[in-house]
Amino acid sequence: MKNSISLFILSIVLLASCSTKNTEEAQQQPEVSQLDSPTLAGAESGEPFLFTYQDSIVYLSWIEKKGEESTFKLSSLVDGKWTTPVTIASGNSWFVNWADYPMMARNQNGFIAHFLDRSADGKFTYDVKFTTSQSAESTWANPKILHDDGKQAEHGFVSLVPYEDKFFVTWLDGRNTVMEGMENMDHGHHGEMSLRAAILDSNGNKLDEWELDKRTCDCCQTSAAITSTGPVVVYRDRSGEEIRDMSIVRLMNGEWTEPKSIHNDNWKIAGCPVNGPRVSAIGNTIATAWFTMASDSAQVNVIFSNDSGEIFGKSIRIDEGSPIGRVDIVLLDEQTAVVSWMEGTLIKAVKVRNDGSKESSIVISASSESRSSGFPQMTKSGNKLIFAWTDSKEKSIKLASLTL
């Protein structure tokens, strides 16, 4: 009898303990909070991009369309509210694309932003143009063309990051893809898309420029970060056998390394998947997330390096069986990153560590697999993550925050 009573009491204690533990875990689960949008009511808005300055000030840029005119807008998040949007630039001949979205960046000297402007009547003939400003509210400079090849070809998929008191920029360059008189053909490709990079001062003067890889995938986003040893660029490469895996190049002691695969997925595909990688850096630690369908298995993977990309660890799969990619990544510290991606129609995020462990994923929002929903964006500010994406039905930008 005593044994029965003791077992009964023990059961109650264990159930109470489990209930308390589950309550504590539920309380520790981060909550997703919806944020108001600074976009103009009734305007057709899309192509959001997020940037955080010194881990404190969050900037949101996007494009608003009215008829044939495109307007590049910018707002900052202050005390949980977005400031009145300012106009960076506008035009009637822009190339506005769901995957090749404009970006902006800020350093201690000012701002830089880029957009795409058509150079001819061809479907894929456009230039990368950029503009600078000492402050977001100041007059932005007259736009300049980033590249100096003078070709009516495809240029885009830019990455902009602050680099000391300057800016580092990398892009896909189609100067070698066109033949005279053939510019108006689909993509105009008769040669190879290349990867280029440059360093600009805060006034937009080009200080250096390089060709980093002479043959790359044609229309996947590039991604750049600054390590303690210098800039790194991660991108989808393209071999002669049409293997399109992720490669890295690094600026070391003033010289660029040869392209090197970060992981051999061996994804052989005849066309561009339009699904680029994202990289984040703290010191000499970098983390990269990317999408692959090697062996017809759709996956989102993450990989870490603690020596600026010289050697990578094992890849870590973070998707849940039905990913479509569209990744982003933010390092929280030298061991931990948060990755966002699209799992079917859901925007998800997960915390993953370099030892391969990961926490439960979090649903940020429902979205759409359509191209018009674009690529969800993520940035970190203090103890929060900010997310932005395009609502393809409402043709507007949605935003959310997640407390870490």
Image (cartoon, rainbow, N blue to C red):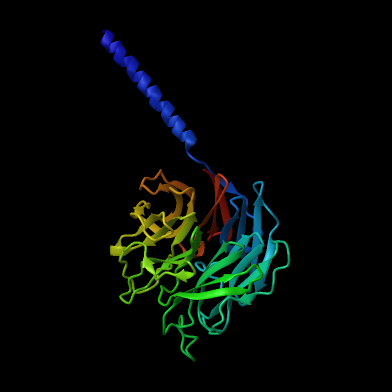
Q: Residue at x 62, y 63 (%)?
A: 165
Disc count in the image?
0
Which residue appears farthest toward the bottom when viewing the image? 181
Residue in the image at 36% along x and 69% along y:
244
Please give the name of the residue rendered at 45% of the width and 82% of the height, measured from the top-left corner: 186
Q: Quadrant of the N terminus?
A: top left
The residue nearer to you, when weighing 16 against 255, is 255
Q: Is residue 326 above or below residue 218?
A: above
x, y percentage for residue 376? 50, 58
User: From this viewpoint, is residue 114 visible?
Assistant: yes
**95 left or right, relative to 301:** right
Q: Position of residue 300 (x, y in %)?
A: 38, 57
Does residue 348 appear anywhere in the picture? Answer: no
| Residue at the right extreme, as displayed | 138
* Residue 282 at x, y percent in the picture: 49, 53
Image check: 339 left or right of 105? left
Residue at left offset 34%, top offset 59%:
298
Q: Is residue 366 left or right of residue 90?
A: left
Residue 338: x, y in percent?
Answer: 46, 50
* Outermost front residue: 253
Q: Name the one closer to the observer, 181 or 346.
A: 181
Q: Quadrant of residue 245?
A: bottom left
